[in-house]
Amino acid sequence: MSVVTSRTGTENARIVINHEKCNLCGLCVKVCKDFSLLIEDHTLTVSDQPLFGCIGCGQCVAVCPRDAIMVEGRTLSPGDFKPLKADHLPDYTSLYQLMLNRRSIRDFRDKPVPREITEQILAMAVTAPMGLPPSDVGVMILDGKEKVRAFSFDFIDMLQRARWMASPLALNLMRPFIGKDNYLMFKSFIIPMVNFFSETRKKEQNYLLYDAPLAMMFYGNLSDPADPYIAATYATLAAESLGLGACMIGSVGPFLKSMGPDFRKKYHLPSKMHDSIMVVFGYPQVKYRKTIQRSFERVFYA
């Protein structure tokens, strides 16, 4: 039995044990929640009765103090495991300040983002945790203001062709099927937003992606629905640390789930779009001098 992903199909990873190095400390057995490992007759052994089969999480490799175990397959190879540098970790105060500084930036200087900065953002985003390894998150990159604007106007043109779906008549017809909350969301936000995009598009104004010099779409295939959003969040924090501003744009992904096959094909996106989020990046045009004290809806200990 195996856990299926779009990248690995039904393949399980393979656990390789160096018995000469193994001292039977049992740490790998403790951290493997698939029960793929056991100590039997004073020997570390790969179980023939795991829960799913090795998914390639790499926990056993990461915890072994003697480099006695390796995991291969499901996109993994020995070179993918790197030593940790615990002495380089930021303290709580500096990490908290970084997060306080980060806010949604939609006004950008007319300055390109160098390719090396883009690669640094991706290097941090790919470290994001995932529901099941290997990550099923894909990233589409629009590098350059011209590409961002072309994507934006193509998307708005697609919305205009389906504008009847956002008409008052269509909304009233859908009301019994979409519920009160969705009806109010369409009426108060989605329809005005689509109309605004269409009107400003006629003036060659880009209020969808704000003519940012860089945009990335994080999308999922068979991934946990949260995976693209977590990776995108890591990307925004990376951007902040590199002197850029960023903003998540939630108005693109929901439409691509159910419409625009030609649009998806043009931009090499999956034919069946699952959860996705667009993020725009660039050098901020204005400087913010205050943060905002935010709050959760409720916090309680059950």
Image (cartoon, grey):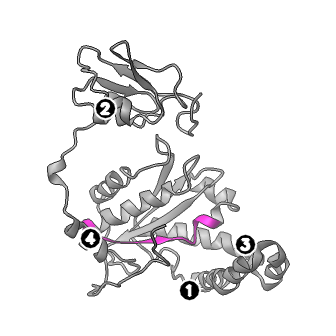
First in residue order: circle 1 vs circle 4: 4
Q: Residues within 10 Å of mark 4 (few under 14, many from 20)?
A: few
In the picture shown, does residue 146 fall above or below 292? above
Disc on res. 161: 3
Q: Position of residue 97 (x, y in %)?
A: 24, 73
Asked if disc 1 and disc 3 are in contact, CB closer than 8 Å, the reply is no
First in residue order: circle 1 vs circle 2: 2
Disc on res. 96: 4
**The stretch drawn in magenta includes residue 63:** no
Q: Which region shows up in magenta? A: 241-254
Closer-to-camera residue (157/87): 87
In percent of the image, x 65 and y 50: which residue is there? 271
In the picture shown, does residue 31 fall above or below 241? above
Residue type at mark 1?
Lys
Disc on res. 27: 2
Residue 160 picture quarter: bottom right
Number of on-image labels: 4
Residue 177 in sight here = yes
Question: Gap between marks 1 and 4, in whole Å?
Answer: 41 Å
Residue type at mark 2?
Leu
Closer to the observer: label 4 or label 3? 4
